[in-house]
Image: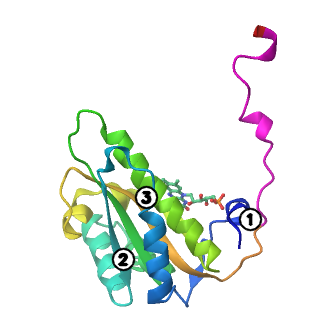
Amino acid sequence: MDAITALHSRRAAPRLTEPAPSARELEQIYQAALRAPDHAMLRPWRFLTISGEGRIKLGELFAEAMPSQTAEERSKLLNAPLRAPMIIIAVAQIVEHPKVPPVEQISSTAAAVQNMSLAAHALGYASIWRTGKAAFDPVVKKGLGLSESDEIVGLLYLGTATVNDRPVPEMDSAEYFEAWPAPENL
Ligand SMILES: Cc1cc2nc3c(=O)[nH]c(=O)nc-3n(C[C@H](O)[C@H](O)[C@H](O)COP(=O)(O)O)c2cc1C
């Protein structure tokens, strides 16, 4: 798939199943992440790849971090990571830098997430970028071995789409792009 086709046709897939990318394909996805733009070459990103039994542990961590009022709520948390065969958690490891504020380090990590999503799509897989309360929960961070200053930028759920007929919405670029200054002000 050429790059423009990949960019124009990627869609989030909320329901994902096996297969997940193979080890060789995963390395291609990782390399795409590592080509994200990165001010001052800080390499502010870290990634945790979770699959198989690891997803059960992640669900247990979610349930421990966010005590549930009902059994249904608890079951939802326990099962959340089972919505895909693989999850890549993207973390911005924020450092103090005179020229690169935290927002840029987070932006760089976000670009890495999008690069992975597009690489997966180009390889015939699908994904959905999620966050939710878990991404901002200090107990979740601690359980993942992260420090307080780390920011979870996204959980990229990866696998094969079970339904891939969601149409790509048609967007009118004129609603979002305009020339500046407007031609009449030139
Ligand atoms: C930072 C970020 C966090 C997101 N968190 C969630 C989430 O927690 N749950 C969810 O259903 N979609 C979430 N989304 C949106 C989906 O990834 C997806 O973009 C959305 O379903 C629209 O589908 P599309 O990307 O195919 O247009 C998030 C997107 C971003 C950029």
Question: Ligand 1 within 8 A of label 3's CB?
Answer: yes
Task: Identify the secondary structure beneath mark 2.
Answer: strand
Say which amino acid is labelled 1.
Thr
Q: Quadrant of residue 178?
A: top right
The boundaries of the magenta stretch are 167-184
Residue that badge 3 annotates: 132
Whether residue 21 is in magenta: the answer is no
Residue that badge 2 annotates: 49
Q: Position of residue 36 (x, y in %)?
A: 45, 56
Say which amino acid is labelled 3.
Gly
For marks 1 and 3, the one nearer the N-term is: 1
Is the residue under label 2 in contact with that under label 3 (CB below 8 Å)?
Answer: no
Residue that badge 1 annotates: 5
Coloring scheme used: rainbow
* 65 displayed left or right of 156: left
State the residue lying farthest toward the top: 185
Q: Residue at x 32, y 77 (%)?
A: 58
Say which amino acid is labelled 2.
Thr
For marks 2 and 1, the one nearer the N-term is: 1
Q: CA distance from mark 1 to mark 3?
A: 30 Å
Q: Position of residue 106 (x, y in %)?
A: 37, 48
* 61 displayed left or right of 153: left
Q: CA distance from mark 3 to mark 2?
A: 18 Å
